[in-house]
Every structure is written in structure tokens, then in C-alpha cells.
Image (spheres, rainbow, N blue to C red):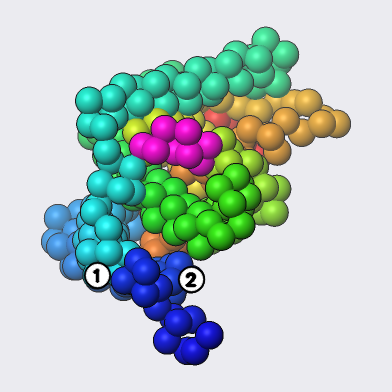
């Protein structure tokens, strides 16, 4: 096999799977960076840098840049219709979205219900408005998590999983799909190491959850359920139950929970640490870590003024 055959699939008239993945990553990441920078320049004219509104706007830029990048990759690298990434069967796509959102909300609600019944958490406050105000804070969170849920599933499941499966197709359908699910889920977990507060345990939890989400894509061939689950998971955890998502503590949420136990088996490892399954926004991690440092100093990243301790935040 000559060099050209290693790089190019003559039968499919496109690069081989590994080349598609490498080149695709580069193109997508490039446009994601460009989108973030452009929106950063726009955002500073309207909101305070490092504020929650700034994070929402720059994430919009990141998501838009990612979308443009993957459209270009689909056309010139993958050489497939964009709809092949999981947007076929539009008549049932919306149903999948609702089902996925419902499953995630149910899972989060059951977990919190069990924790409350066991005395592992207590509700310390309700309807926390935050510095941006309740409505603006909630709308910002919904926009943030919707954008993140869309572009992360599009890249992780639509692009990575599909191309990995095609790369292993010579070994049979079942082995190729299993390999693609595992590899895409492990990659998804590893990239979340960039999140504030990430740990090896959180990466494992993320990868395990990602396998279940990937299974929905494999079984349906559509991203609706995966996007709905991912988005609703983050919204339920951050907006409804007031827990950090990927190290981000939302300024506005419905409930504030304080973890009180158990002491021997720390259940937060299994649930609260899975907060990292959410807003990737890894290109914004430097800003988030700066916010964390401000909190540790007892100041607000929004006002740089001393803040009162918040018992709702897990210790």
C-alpha cells in the first residue's frame, strides 16, 4: 500500500477516517477559536469582562464558530451531507429531543429526591436571583446550556463517533460501533479535564454517562435525544438544583442545596462531581479559573467586592 492509499480512500473519494478526524479537529478548533475571539471583542462593549453575561456571549461565539467549522468539514473533508451527523428524520427529531430532556430531568430529580430522603442534602434557599437578576440569569443559563449541549453533541457524537465507527468498519459492524462509542466517550471525558474542579473521578463519571448518550445516537441515528439529554442535564443540575456545572456556579437558580453527608461513602463523587458533564467551554477555562481564584479570595468575579459565604455551595 503506497502513501496515497494510506491517506486517501479511493472507493469513497475522500480522506481516510484518521485523516478526517485529525484535519476535522484542526478546522473545527480553528473556527471555534475565531468565533470566541470575535464574540469576545463584541461582548466587552456590552457586558463586564468575566461576568456571567460575558461567559454566555463568548460561548455563543464558540458554538457558532464550531458550527461553521463542522459545516466546512462536512463539505470539504468528510464529504457528506451535514444531516448525516444526526439530523435526519426531522418528523421524529423533535420527539427525541423531548424524550432526552425528560429522561435527564427525571434522573436528576430522582437523585436529588433520594439524597433529600436520606438526609445527604438539605435545601438552604429557594429562588436565588444573583447579581444579574432572576429572569436575566435564568435566560442566560438556558441559552448557555442549549448552545453547549448542541455543539458538544454535534462534535462528540455526530463527528467523532461516526468517523471512528467508519474507520473500524473493516472489523465488522458490532466491533466498529462498540469501539466508536468507547473511544468517543473516553475522548469526551478527557477533554473535560480542562474544566475547573475536574478530577479523574469526574472524568470517569462523564465518560460513563457519555456512553449512555452515545448509545441513543447509535440506536436512532439522530442527535435529538443526545442533545435533549445533555442540555436538560445541565439545566436541571445548575438552574433547578443550583449545583456547579463544569465548575460554573450560576448566579440565578431555583433551589440551593447543601451537602451534609454521608461521611464514609461520599455520594458527591457519583453525582455532584458529574457536574463536569456539561458546559465544556474549554476555550474559556482561563476566565473561569480566574473567577474561581476571585471566589477563593472572598471577592465576586462580577463586582470585585467581598462576598458573603454561600452555604449552598458544596464544600
| Residue pointed to by mark 1 | 76
* Residue 70 seen in the figure: yes
x%, y% of residue 308? 49, 39
Residue range in magenta is 213-222
Q: Residue furthest top?
A: 117
| Residue 49 visible in the shown view | no
> Which of the 4 image quadrants contains residue 287?
bottom left
Q: Residue 215: within the magenta?
A: yes
Counting from the top left corner in percent of width and height, residue 269 is at: 70, 38
Counting residues from the start of the chain, the first of labels 1 and 2 encountered is 2
Q: Residues within 10 Å of mark 1 (few under 14, many from 20)?
A: some
Residue at (44% x, 53% y) in the render: 162
Instruction: List the residue tagged with mark 2.
Output: 18
Labelled disc at residue 288: none
Q: CA distance from mark 1 to mark 2?
A: 15 Å
Q: Quadrant of the C terminus?
A: top right
Contact, mark 1 vs mark 2 (Cβ under 8 Å): no
Amino acid at each position: 500500500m503506497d502513501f496515497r492509499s494510506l491517506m486517501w480512500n479511493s472507493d469513497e473519494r475522500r480522506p481516510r477516517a484518521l485523516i478526517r478526524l485529525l484535519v476535522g479537529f484542526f478546522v473545527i478548533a480553528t473556527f471555534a477559536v475565531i468565533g470566541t475571539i470575535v464574540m469576545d471583542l463584541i461582548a466587552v462593549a456590552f457586558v463586564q469582562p468575566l461576568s456571567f453575561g460575558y461567559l454566555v456571549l463568548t460561548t455563543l461565539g464558540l458554538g457558532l464558530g464550531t458550527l461553521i467549522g463542522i459545516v466546512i468539514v462536512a463539505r470539504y473533508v468528510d464529504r457528506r451531507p451535514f444531516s448525516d451527523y444526526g439530523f435526519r428524520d426531522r418528523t421524529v427529531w423533535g420527539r427525541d429531543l423531548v424524550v432526552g430532556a425528560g429522561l435527564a430531568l427525571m434522573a436528576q430529580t430522582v437523585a436529588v429526591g433520594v439524597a433529600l430522603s436520606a438526609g445527604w442534602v438539605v435545601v438552604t434557599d429557594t429562588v436565588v436571583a444573583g447579581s444579574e437578576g432572576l429572569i436575566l440569569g435564568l435566560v442566560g443559563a438556558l441559552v448557555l446550556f442549549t448552545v453547549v449541549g448542541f455543539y458538544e453533541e454535534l462534535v462528540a457524537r455526530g463527528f467523532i463517533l461516526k468517523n471512528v465507527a467508519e474507520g473500524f468498519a473493516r472489523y465488522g459492524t458490532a466491533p466498529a460501533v462498540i469501539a466508536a462509542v468507547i473511544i468517543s466517550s473516553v475522548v469526551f471525558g478527557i477533554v473535560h479535564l480542562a474544566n475547573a474542579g475536574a478530577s479523574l473521578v469526574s472524568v470517569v463519571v462523564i465518560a460513563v454517562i457519555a456512553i449512555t448518550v452515545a448509545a441513543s445516537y447509535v440506536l436512532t441515528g439522530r442527535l435529538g435525544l443526545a442533545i435533549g439529554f445533555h442540555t436538560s442535564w445541565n439545566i436541571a443540575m445548575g438552574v433547578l438544583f443550583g449545583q456547579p456545572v463544569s465548575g460554573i456556579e450560576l448566579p440565578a437558580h431555583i433551589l440551593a442545596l447543601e451537602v451534609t453527608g454521608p461521611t464514609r461513602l461520599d455520594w458527591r463523587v457519583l453525582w455532584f462531581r458529574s457536574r463536569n458533564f456539561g458546559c465544556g467551554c474549554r476555550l474559556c477555562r482561563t476566565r473561569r479559573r480566574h473567577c474561581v481564584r476571585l471566589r477563593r479570595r472572598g471577592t465576586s468575579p462580577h463586582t470585585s467586592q467581598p462576598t458573603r459565604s454561600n452555604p449552598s455551595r458544596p464544600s
